[in-house]
Image (cartoon, coloured by chain):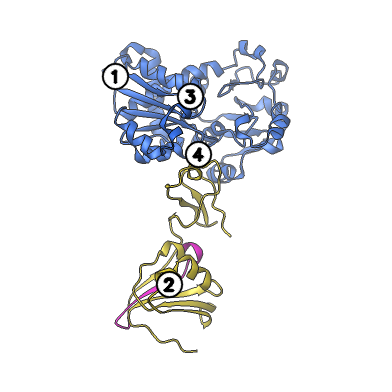
């Protein structure tokens, strides 16, 4: 299967196979990339991973890499300029997440103060545990 | 500008500093009677409280300062829908320091993020109550002469008891501490406190439903009330409220110098007959709370008594 290489834009590589669509949705690429081409390629053979997903975006948009790190740490984001990779970033678990996940604790101040950002901090990197900064409730991660 | 939201915002050295100041206040209250002249403390209490609000206000008056008070959410702009952030910004224009109690967890943190003066968390729902912990620490220190190498039992509601979680966190930073957790199954200490505090710090602990069997080993017994306001379901509250009641006969196996603490208010979990026992320290705790709040107000305002 052939997908054209891109001149200027982003390649989100090394996505765990099957997670590409989830990332596409969480990054809001359907809205961010209304006027550009996006390719979501599933189950690409990979020497390192066996199979992987890739997202190619044909323009230089600003994406929230915290979402990527939270959903699928280990993903690589390549910035392409004039058909060359000018920056390669390996995305790890973010220390802080803002408005990516939401606190479900009915006793938390975020349940009544609608304007407050929902902020979670990584408290246990090994267990991938995030806690609400306000009430310390553990994030429910599907 | 510092605020106090969680007891672990203070280092062990800072807590020692507060103890030193509190002991100096106890020793020579007159020296501190004018230190806060011209300063105002705003007590914003959005949840019913008698002792904590009065304790903060008494602390400020004894330092020579003044107090502005909101004693319920219904009588404040919060009832009109004002956000915590806006309330904190507005009150910062009137007061030099804020003490806030709120039923929602994290509300004082939001206030601290928006206020231009120090904010003290005076209790946020079932979450934190750091100044109660300071009172508990000073009480243990005054009774035992140390904060390390102690066996401390916590009895009653260990699930929703915010004072229990805070004190366990604070004590876990001292050497030789052993924690004994006594509660019914339904009100056991949350597993995240065990994992994040006790196991992480390597603190030996034991869990039991039998108070009498562990009584002889305790240096401190911290009793708690099963709090009605923390339950969503009244049936559960009624079933569990009388789980542990301390009576004089249960103290038979206890050490003669064991200290009995309780954050108060008590309902029936400590029999009134125990009040006259020299081991009962819960009314001393009330007094110690005021001294520690005085020390904290001075620290957060950057004030010292003249030497």
Where residue B56 sits in the image (x, y, percent)? 42, 22
* Chain B color in figure: blue
Calculate the distance from the C-alpha at mark 2 to the C-alpha at mark 3.
51 Å
* Residue bounds of the magenta highlight: A69-83
Return the residue at label 3: B135
Residue B177 in view in this figure: no
Q: Quadrant of residue B80?
A: top left
Q: Is residue B109 magenta?
A: no
For mark 1, what is the residue? B305
Secondary element at tag 3: helix
The mark that comes first in sequence, 4 or 1, is 4
Quarter of the image for residue B298 reads top left
Q: Nearer the viewer, mark 4 or mark 1?
A: 4
Q: Chain of mark 1?
A: B
Please give the residue where the numbered disc 2 appears in the rendered image: A76
Chain ID, mark 4: B
Q: Mark 4 sits on what residue?
A: B105
The quarter of the rendered structure image containing the N terminus of chain B is top left
Is B280 situated left or right of A57 in this image? right
- Asked if both marks, 4 and 2, belong to the same chain, the answer given is no
């Amino acid at each position: 299967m052939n997908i054209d290489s891109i001149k200027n834009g982003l390649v989100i590589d090394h996505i765990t196979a099957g997670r590409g669509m989830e990332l596409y949705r969480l990054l809001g690429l359907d809205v961010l990339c209304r006027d550009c081409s996006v390719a979501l390629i599933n189950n690409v053979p990979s020497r390192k991973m066996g199979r992987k997903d890739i997202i190619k975006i044909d323009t230089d948009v600003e994406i929230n890499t915290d979402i990527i790190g939270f959903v699928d740490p280990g993903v690589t984001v390549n910035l392409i300029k004039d058909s060359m990779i000018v920056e390669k970033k390996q995305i790890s678990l973010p220390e802080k997440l803002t408005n990516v996940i939401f606190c479900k604790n009915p006793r938390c101040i975020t349940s009544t103060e609608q304007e407050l950002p929902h902020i979670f901090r990584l408290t246990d990197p090994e267990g991938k545990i995030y806690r609400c900064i306000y009430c310390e409730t553990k994030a429910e991660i599907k | 500008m510092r605020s106090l939201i969680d007891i672990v915002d203070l280092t062990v050295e800072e807590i020692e500093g507060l103890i030193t100041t509190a002991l100096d206040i106890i020793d020579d209250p007159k020296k501190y009677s004018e230190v806060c002249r011209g300063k105002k403390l705003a007590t914003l209490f959005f949840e019913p409280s008698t002792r904590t609000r009065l304790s903060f206000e008494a602390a400020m008056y004894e330092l020579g300062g003044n107090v502005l008070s909101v004693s319920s959410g219904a009588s404040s702009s919060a009832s009109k829908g004002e956000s915590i952030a806006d309330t904190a910004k507005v009150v910062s224009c009137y007061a030099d320091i804020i003490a806030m109690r709120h039923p929602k967890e994290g509300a004082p943190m939001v206030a601290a993020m928006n206020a231009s003066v120090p904010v003290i968390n005076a209790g946020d729902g079932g979450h934190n109550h750091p100044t109660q912990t300071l009172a508990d620490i000073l009480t243990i220190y005054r009774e035992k002469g140390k904060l390390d190498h102690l066996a401390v039992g916590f009895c009653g509601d260990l699930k929703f008891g915010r004072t229990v979680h805070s004190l366990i966190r604070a004590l876990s930073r001292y050497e030789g501490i052993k924690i004994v957790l006594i509660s019914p199954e339904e009100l056991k200490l949350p597993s995240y406190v065990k994992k994040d505090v006790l196991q992480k710090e390597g603190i030996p602990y034991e869990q039991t439903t039998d108070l009498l069997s562990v009584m002889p080993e305790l240096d401190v017994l911290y009793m708690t009330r099963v709090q009605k306001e923390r339950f969503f379901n009244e049936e559960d509250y009624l079933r569990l409220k009388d789980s542990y009641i301390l009576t004089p006969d249960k103290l038979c196996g206890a050490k003669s110098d064991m200290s009995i603490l309780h954050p108060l208010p008590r309902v029936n979990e400590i029999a009134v007959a125990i009040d006259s026992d020299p081991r009962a320290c819960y009314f001393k705790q009330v007094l110690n709370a005021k001294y520690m709040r005085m020390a904290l107000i001075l620290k957060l305002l950057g004030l010292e008594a003249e030497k």
